[in-house]
Image: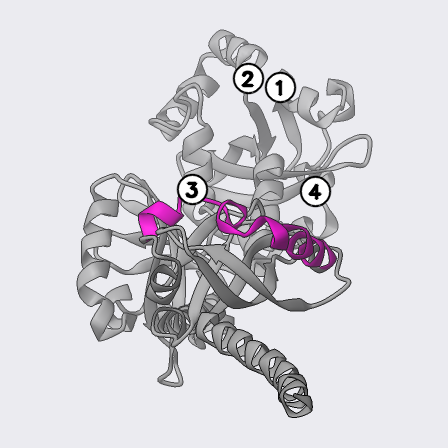
Amino acid sequence: MKTFSQTPTQLFTETQQTGITAGFPDLVHSSFKDGDWYTAFYNNIPVMLHSIDNSGYIIDVSEYWLLKLGYKREEVIGRKSIDFLTEESREYAISKVFPVFLKTGRVEDIQYQFVKKNGDIMDGLISSTSEKDDNGVVIRSFAVIIDITDRLRAEREKKTFLELSLDIVGSCGLDGYFREINPAVEKILGYTQEEFCSKSFMDFVHPDDVEKTLREAEKSFSGSPTVSFTNRYRCKDGTYKWLEWNTIPVGDYLHTIARDATKWKEAQEALQISENQFKGAFEYSAIGMALVSPEGRWKEVNEQVCEIIGYDKSELMKLTFQDITHPDDIDLDLRYLQELIEDKRPSYTMEKRYFHKNGTIVWVLLAVSKVTDKNNTILHYIAQIQNITERKKAEQQLREQAALLEVVPDAISIRDLD
């Protein structure tokens, strides 16, 4: 599996600004043979260059070399090239690089750390070739150095971000294989980076999500970004997790970020079940059920409410509860409602009168509670409405009968006296 860092060769190739690496050996040999051209070349090219003899001492450096490291020419000429390296880089040069260079006459893309005059460290990438005598012995060498300090710093920061990211971050090729993936894939799905990159991403997709995933991938590889696409991926233990993907196509790759959306999905499904249950209880309740806005407008009603007060749903949506409440009941209703708003009571129940659409009076038993958001802002009220008109009529008849019974004994007593 490839890492997120570019290879030194890639970095070197990307930073060549003058074509100096094209035909590099021939260019160097011609430079050595043409003194005037060689001097002009060293003094004017914006690249770090140095030449050393067969004993490793610097015999010339470019002005740009001096500028980047902060030395004067007289402080450099005649000193060993490894004097300007960190201890670790010196050991690496002596034990690993020099033996190869003396044998082959060239090295490419060797990463060293150089010590500036002020003590700062510069990360450099060096490529070198040699000039040999007729017997094939190296007599001197020529090197090109590229400052990659900023790039390595950026790569380290990127690597740190990727390692610390809780989301899966990677790059996927046109063949469906991830070329790069960060460690979060193991935390979320259980696979090592190598295991995940060894298979096509479709091998991990839930069978029920394959078709929609293929459609989305086709769109992405055609140049369209993917935003908040969700599907299920198989974990190493055989379970599945929901992932939410955002991708950007760049060339032959999709750069992707996927977050674990399992808990969110489960919460959504639970909410949907709860909403369906509430909707079923709301729609098929034996009593009237309504959602009322904080301003008093009817937002949703079931059929029982419509049957109780005679309006259809579209008509009620244009009204407030105050519009159809008997004037003698408004004040008490609003007082209870204000206490509910101020959290002085969790709910309230009262008997009140509504005007039916046909103008008659309908008595109802009203129970009201509120629904709030996390900031305790009222979203709506839930009203339960039960038609008690017949009960109120029966109560009235009982009262009238009781009053009549109180009068009858007096009438009998008067007749007896006669």
Can the viewer see residue 54 in this picture? Answer: no
Left of 69 or right of it: where is 36? left
Cβ–Cβ under 8 Å for marks 1 and 2: yes
Cβ–Cβ under 8 Å for marks 4 and 2: no
Residue in view at x 60 percent, y 83 percent: 402
User: Whole-Å distance between the Cαs marked 3 and 4?
Assistant: 20 Å
Q: Which residue is mark 2?
A: 46
User: Whole-Å distance between the Cαs marked 3 and 1?
Assistant: 21 Å
In depth, the one of 40 and 327 nearer the eye is 327
Left of 222 or right of it: where is 265? right
User: Whole-Å distance between the Cαs marked 1 and 2?
Assistant: 6 Å
Crowding near the residue tagged with mark 2, few <14, some 14–19, many ≥20 C-alpha atoms within 10 Å: some
Crowding near the residue tagged with mark 3, few <14, some 14–19, many ≥20 C-alpha atoms within 10 Å: some
Cβ–Cβ under 8 Å for marks 2 and 3: no
- Name the image quarter holding the N terminus: bottom left
Q: Is the stretch drawn in magenta largely helix, strand or loop? A: helix
Left of 137 or right of it: where is 370? right
The residue range painted magenta reads 313-339
Crowding near the residue tagged with mark 1, few <14, some 14–19, many ≥20 C-alpha atoms within 10 Å: some
Q: Which mark is residue 64?
A: 1
